Amino acid sequence: QVQLGESGGGLVQAGGSLRLSCAASERTFSNYAMGWFRQGPGKEREFVAAISWDGGSTYYEDSVKGRFTISRDNAKNTVYLQMNSLKPEDTAVYYCAARVIGYITTTVEKYDYWGQGTQVAVSS
């Protein structure tokens, strides 16, 4: 059972930046595709970004393209989400997720393990 732990959330003003981290409990992390999702108040969980097992492929939801960057360090069992030019509509609980099959997908149901989430709040 892979355990994921997110950190780095907080309160920031619009236009600011945050860097989220997600640490995995197992070295098999390096075989997994990783994704970031978010869930705003009263909304369903939605895809934000994903990265393949080797970091060679990434994919972003349209509203975050050019502002967010997903990356990973397999030696540290950690995936990151650098968020720049934050907007109030980015406010949500952000979750990282691991997919045993190492290729990218945007589908929530295709991820096997989830973290507990970290809150991001962007004030206007």
Image (cartoon, rainbow, N blue to C red):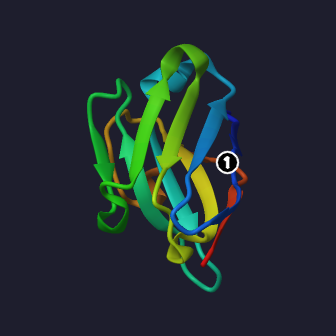
- In this rendering, would 10 be left or right of 22? right
- In this rendering, would 62 be left or right of 94? left
The x, y position of residue 103, in whole percent, is 31, 38
The quadrant of the image that shows the N terminus is top right
Count of numbered marks: 1
User: Which residue is painted at 47% across and 53% down in the image?
Assistant: 84
Residue most extreme to the top: 75
Classify 95 as above or below 15: above
Classify 16 as above or below 40: above
Foreground residue among 65 and 13: 13
What residue would you read off at disc 1?
Answer: 115
The x, y position of residue 14, in whole percent, is 56, 69
SS of the residue under disc 1: loop
User: Which residue is painted at 60% across and 76% down in the image?
Assistant: 40
The x, y position of residue 74, in whole percent, is 50, 19
The quadrant of the image that shows the C terminus is bottom right
Classify 98 as above or below 43: above
- In this rendering, would 117 be left or right of 37? right
User: Which residue is painted at 50% across and 71% down in the image?
Assistant: 87
Location of residue 123 by image quarter = bottom right
Foreground residue among 32 and 46: 46
Badge 1 local density, few (<14 within 10 Å), some, or many (20+)?
A: some
User: Which residue is painted at 53% across and 34% down in the image?
Assistant: 79
Residue most extreme to the bottom: 42
Residue kind at label 1, given as amino acid type? Gly
The x, y position of residue 98, in whole percent, is 52, 41
